[in-house]
Image (cartoon, coloured by chain):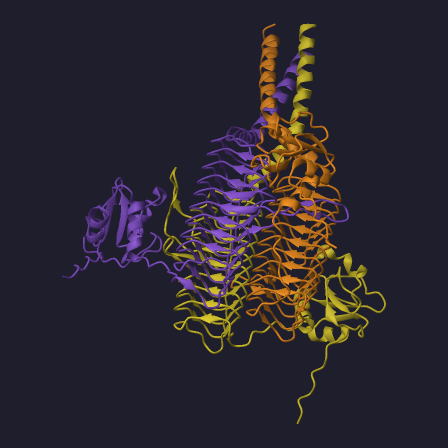
Chain colours: A purple, B yellow, C orange
Amino acid sequence: MSTPTPTRVDTSGALAALVGGRLAGCAEVRITGVASLAEAEPHHVSFLGNPLYRSRVVSSAAGTVIVPEDFAEPPPAGRAWIVCADPSAAFMQAVALFAPPPVSFEPGVHRTAVVHETAVVPATAHVGAGTVLEAGVVLGRRTIVGAGGYVGQETRIGDDCLIYPNVTVRERCLLGNRVIIHSGTVIGSDGFGYIPGKDGHTKIPQVGTVQIDDDVEIGAQVAIDRARFGRTWIRRGAKIDNLVQIAHNVIIGEHCFVIAQAGISGSTRIGNGAILAGQAGVAGHIEVGDGAVVMAQAGVTKNVAPGAHVFGSPATDPKIHARNQFALKNVAKLQAALRQLQLEVAALRHQIENP
Amino acid sequence: MSTPTPTRVDTSGALAALVGGRLAGCAEVRITGVASLAEAEPHHVSFLGNPLYRSRVVSSAAGTVIVPEDFAEPPPAGRAWIVCADPSAAFMQAVALFAPPPVSFEPGVHRTAVVHETAVVPATAHVGAGTVLEAGVVLGRRTIVGAGGYVGQETRIGDDCLIYPNVTVRERCLLGNRVIIHSGTVIGSDGFGYIPGKDGHTKIPQVGTVQIDDDVEIGAQVAIDRARFGRTWIRRGAKIDNLVQIAHNVIIGEHCFVIAQAGISGSTRIGNGAILAGQAGVAGHIEVGDGAVVMAQAGVTKNVAPGAHVFGSPATDPKIHARNQFALKNVAKLQAALRQLQLEVAALRHQIENP
Amino acid sequence: MSTPTPTRVDTSGALAALVGGRLAGCAEVRITGVASLAEAEPHHVSFLGNPLYRSRVVSSAAGTVIVPEDFAEPPPAGRAWIVCADPSAAFMQAVALFAPPPVSFEPGVHRTAVVHETAVVPATAHVGAGTVLEAGVVLGRRTIVGAGGYVGQETRIGDDCLIYPNVTVRERCLLGNRVIIHSGTVIGSDGFGYIPGKDGHTKIPQVGTVQIDDDVEIGAQVAIDRARFGRTWIRRGAKIDNLVQIAHNVIIGEHCFVIAQAGISGSTRIGNGAILAGQAGVAGHIEVGDGAVVMAQAGVTKNVAPGAHVFGSPATDPKIHARNQFALKNVAKLQAALRQLQLEVAALRHQIENP
């Protein structure tokens, strides 16, 4: 008995059937790949994910476009729309069909890796070329530590982690399961702590560690300092973008988003589900409440209440921020009104003095 | 027959002749190296490149100084000026004479490099110690991939590229010719994309790639994310400084300058010849027009017209920015004028009520 | 003759004696480690270092807490306070007692390191796995260059330096004694210099170097560019945090603090003992005076006087900054006063015109 060959999805009609969408137009448009509306060619499938780009659907060269249910315009001859409740999700299915398979890493320790005799590496783990695992390191099952990596003494990494090439994790850190870390990132560097002195600053030993919980993803070029003592703590499900700075003893709450180039100073706590947008900064010893949103480039110098949104530098709530912006715009009007009043008063005086 | 020994350029007179400048002062000042006005010693040649530093020429210890044609002051005894139309260009010639030769990398693959059997490495290319080239990598002629580098599966790098040590280029990226990448940089990390959820965010696969065209230079510690699908695209001749963040699906136009610590969010397009100054940020899905200039620390939240200059956070055009600054300065005056008017009105009332 | 066993410090009483503090409460509270007030368990010693956290002392689970002399509240039953003039210093003694010993690196060159035959490596130095030392490199005594490091041609590193794994130091740099550099950092990348042109920018050779003096510490992911000519110079005792950008020909004064994600543009000089706070930016060719303080996220566009503090972007002195903030708050009041005056003038006119 032979397994039936799966139907190949290579036309607009077949893709519509697969994603459960309604086909409008030609069912035989050939599909060989995915692309954005701006970059697509006739044999690509694209999608309208952002209503802002509505006008680009017809003008796109994409032969097939996945559109939302309220998209009224009919497809030109020889093209096809696939009408869906959630074009973004349907497009993700298409991407999975046509994208090249993700890179895989075979289990095993590369012959050029340098693994200390006390390190524990399960047979299902991958240790890349030139990677160093120091004494007492423990890797979980199916965990990948890419080429050129460094894992310091006694650091423990859980199951199913994916550490891309050229990542540094210093000694005595603790990583949970399914943690992803992108290239260039450094975990566990010393916190920035000194006793200042006119003739030199004395380094405060940074003897704590970094704990990263399950399902955290950390971008490229991130720096997460180890604690002065205790731990710097990235909690479950938090997602951290590129070039972010996380200082010693910071706590990042569960499922937070910390966007690129944001920076968080020492001992600050970010609540669960909070969002720090790009290039935002948070001072030390601050509490940012659960679900709070710190807008891009904001500079937070005081605690932020749960659920609050803050803007600007120094960061304020949206009402104060709007009032400031409004006041600026009205100064010119104020000035004109004052000028007018001065003229009126002069006229009155003239009238009184020359009755 | 012997080749004539080239004249050694080691005096002010010889250098003036070489750069085609007019000598003022002593022709026999010895020159052994180059230095800035502030750091020069008597046997150095320096230059006046910035009119701001005009007063430093005479007080500098430099024996020889390359000066512009409008520099009137004569050299003190025992020193020399070399008068040129373009002192900066002339000084570059001097630098080339006295600077140590640039580091060279011999063709060949270092014995500790790990090159997959399917990778294509021309005999003229250099692959440094410990560098990893994965399956399907193609390097161009005379291309250098420095020590500790990582090049992922099927990535193609053109001719005459210079990839400094400890750079990571992930799978399926495409680099043109004469691309320079400085140490620590990461190309092709995953874009930051999730479907948010209260109990955890679902990762959106980032199956696109990064394309870097001819003559691009990228500084140290830069992060350039791969596209969600399609490509993140750095176009011909763009120059990117250190610690810059470039998110997924961004397009950087030809010959752009992106200065240190600037950050560009997903799907934004920067036009040809635009300049993003240091620490500037641009939101996602924005268009910055050809030749536009985003000033340092600006935060761009709306499209920027071609050729426009924008300032501040949120970024506005220079007129609005100036009006805001002016308004702030005038509030105090406005307040004084109002106070004055209040007194006048009170006086008038008194006059009316006590005729 | 046997060495006497040192007294083990494992109770509140023994620790009080060791740090020279006065014990309040129970002398027999067991101590097995250190922790912050928020994270401590009963067998931990904690401390009150920041008066803001005064209310947390009693509510903390810490069995033993080091408190300042003005802390009046008595310890609950079964707990102990250790009363000290300087709780922070006393706590550092406790940390040293209970912290795991710092990681040590054995003298010697790892078998996988690639050391050029002309490099000088004293027997007391450590060169980690896979580390590359190019021709003419000189390491000082007891200096450590961790795994995956790269040190370029003719770079000299002094005694007792600690270069963490995966650091890149390019050619011809000069490092003093007791320099610490954290992982991921790049020293000596090319400065960002081009002669701009419509059809392409011409690279200006960056033939200078980087000099780092004694007792400097540099965080993770820092980029320090080499000079165009001459040197980029980090002077004695300066402390530089993570993800900082230092452009070509910058001078950082003695004992400066440069906090995370700050950026300094080309040829700028930072005076001795100055502080640049997080995410601050300084334009090129600026002088920041000795002891000046640039606040977080400030953008410095003009020289800063010695000892001055500057805020905001563009950065201004605190008086102007305060005046701006005050003006904004008063516009609404001004508006109300103007409205009132308009009514009064209207009433006066009515009175005059209807006598």
Q: Where is residue A285 in the image (x, y as percent from the top left)?
A: 59, 36
In the displayed orientation, state which residue is furthest to the front.
C1
Image quadrant occupied by the N terminus of chain C: bottom right
- Location of residue C209 (image quadrant): bottom right
Above or below for B203 versus B230: above
Q: Is C87 left or right of B141, judged from the image as shown?
A: right
In the displayed orientation, state which residue is furthest to the right.
B77
Q: Is B345 left or right of A233, judged from the image as shown?
A: right
Q: Is B43 left or right of C152, judged from the image as shown?
A: right
Can the viewer see residue B67 in this picture?
A: no
Q: Position of residue A10 (x, y in %)?
A: 22, 57
Q: Residue, x 52% and y 77% (percent of image)? A: B107
Above or below for C355 versus A5: above
Q: Where is residue C167 in the image (x, y as percent from the top left)?
A: 58, 60
- Location of residue B10 (image quadrant): bottom right
Q: Position of residue B243 (x, y in %)?
A: 55, 54
Above or below for B5 versus A228: below
In the displayed orientation, state which residue is furthest to the left.
A1
Q: Is A128 left or right of A41, judged from the image as shown?
A: right
Residue A5 vs residue B242, the one in the foreground:
A5
Residue B60 vs residue B148, the one in the foreground:
B148
